[in-house]
Amino acid sequence: MKYLKWTGISLTALFVLWLLASLFLTSQAGSLVFNNTVSWAPVPNFGYELDFIENGEGNNISVWSFEAQGKANSPAILYLHGNSGRINDMFPELVKYGTVYSPAYPGYHESEGQPNTDSVYDAALTTYDWMVEEQGVNEEDIIIFGHSMGGSPATYTASKRPNAKKLILANTFSSIQSMCFNDYSILCAFSGNILNTARYAEDVSIPVRHYAYEDDLDVPFEENKKLFEYFDNSDDKEFITMDQFTHTYPDFDLIGEELR
């Protein structure tokens, strides 16, 4: 009986420790996932426009716009950035193919508010609607491009706006919980609602092009493949392996084939 008693106490203690550790890890998700403290990079040194649009919480969201470089009938590219903010080197590459609109999530760059799953998704969708309603962009001309963490709001937006031209993803993941399990195993039980990209991938019906760097040290290659399996509702989808460049700087010579 004494053995059973101590076994029960030990199991209870282990459960409490697991619960406390899991809740603590989940409570720290904001600072771990949304690395906005490094997002104040220098602004681009070539022409762009800065607009502020109001999100669903009444905060001002910063949107950078870059005109396409001399291309008639070019698409509009909605660039959704990763967890450390907009990458300036992306813009010279993207404007080769179309006019670029890039919002900063709440708490990033010049945007007000705090970043979390809902506010990040809202910033992406609000910018898409602003492009259509205020900038006169045809939905059929919008390419939604999500890099790294930006793949999650990109997928969310594509699931809500089925008239967009195409969804392009680069080096992204199926969910934060799935990423968390790679490092923290069973401590990730309560992180299922944080940037659950796979949940919305199932509702995407537009063409999908998913690029993944096979030696990525930030988002495992297998995470990309795992997410791609959820795009069941798209009849035009393709997974493309990149064997050059890095997580931060994908192969735009390759991606550019679809940015048209």
Image: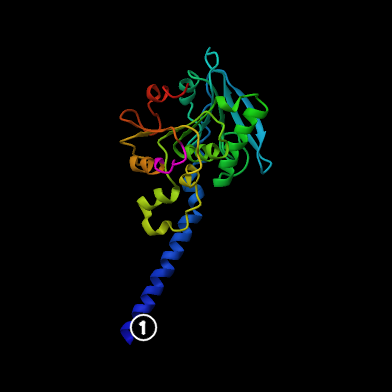
Find the magenta span and give its range: 228-234
Q: Is residue 83 visible?
A: no
Q: Quadrant of residue 5?
A: bottom left
Residue 82 location (% of width, % of height): 47, 37
Residue 76 location (% of width, % of height): 55, 24
- Quadrant containing the N terminus is bottom left
Residue 56 location (% of width, % of height): 66, 42
Where 116 falls versus 235 (above or below)?
below
The residue lying at 31 percent from left, 83 percent from top is: 3
Q: Name the residue under label 1.
A: 5
Q: Which colour scheme is used?
A: rainbow
| Of 36 and 165, the residue lying toward us | 165
* Three-letter residue code for mark 1: Lys
Q: Residue furthest front?
A: 235
Give the structural element (helix, strand or loop) at label 1.
helix
Q: Quadrant of residue 6?
A: bottom left
Where 13 falls versus 198 (above or below)?
below
Residue 159 location (% of width, % of height): 53, 40
Q: Which residue lies furthest to the bottom in this view?
A: 1
Q: Is residue 231 magenta?
A: yes
Where 73 falls versus 142 (above or below)?
above
The residue lying at 37 percent from left, 24 percent from top is: 254
